[in-house]
Image (cartoon, rainbow, N blue to C red):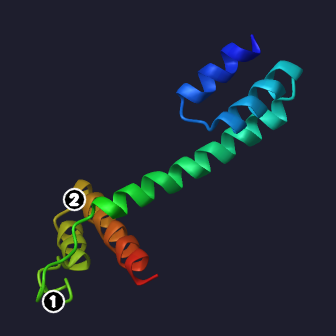
Amino acid sequence: MKKTLIAYFTRTGITKKLAEDTAKALADGDSAKVFANQSKFLEEYAKKVKADAIKKTPKPGAGSGSGTEGAVDYGKKIEEAQKNGDFTAVAYYTRLKAQAEAEAQANNQ
């Protein structure tokens, strides 16, 4: 059964060493170790996904400016939507504003 578990874990992307450790912990009934190993794998996987996304992001061309020239004023859009009673648009623009702020903060780090 242990070899089957190791094979299963390695097919999911876990390294062989971590798969062996996780399979042993599962066979021994050490659920805390199993969950800790899964958390470790998920953290490593998230880092890999972010690194891959950054590698695939195209670099801005020369003379592209600061990137704020064509930026949408979400505060103004939210205010207009509130005046019109369009709460769906308020939620939409609020989400877009938060996303833009998060991206700007991530780019500044």
Given residues 38 and 52, the one toward you in this image is 52
Q: Does 17 sit left or right of 31 as displayed?
A: left
Q: Is residue 31 left or right of residue 88?
A: right
How far across and how far down the image is residue 49, in percent? Answer: 44, 52
Residue at the image position 83 percent from the left and 28 percent from the top: 25
Task: Determine which residue is flagged by label 2.
Answer: 89
Check disc 2 and report its element: helix, strand or loop: helix
6 lies left or right of 53: right
Specify few, some or many for label 1: CA neighbours under 10 Å numbering under 14, 14-19, or 20 or more: few
Q: Is residue 2 above or below residue 95?
A: above
Q: Quadrant of residue 104?
A: bottom left
Front-lying residue, 71 or 108: 108
Q: Nearer the viewer, residue 95 or 47?
A: 47
Picture residue at 82% right of the left edge, 25% below the top: 24
Secondary structure of the residue carrying tag 1 is: loop
Give x and y (percent) for residue 96.
Answer: 28, 65
**Horizontal side, residue 83 vs residue 44: left or right:** left
- Dividing the picture into quadrants, the one containing residue 74 is bottom left
Q: Position of residue 26 (x, y in %)?
A: 80, 23
Mark closest to the chain's N terminus, 1 or 2: 1
Q: Nearer the viewer, mark 1 or mark 2?
A: 1
Taking the view exactly as shown, the residue that stands out farthest to the top is: 1
Q: Which mark is residue 6?
A: none
In depth, the one of 94 and 48 nearer the eye is: 48
Residue 27's place in the image compared with 20, above or below, is above
Q: Which residue is mark 1?
A: 65
Q: Please give the name of the residue rendered at 11% of the width and 89% of the height, measured from the top-left corner.
A: 63
Residue displayed at 43% across by 60% down: 51
Residue 54, percent from left and from top? 35, 64
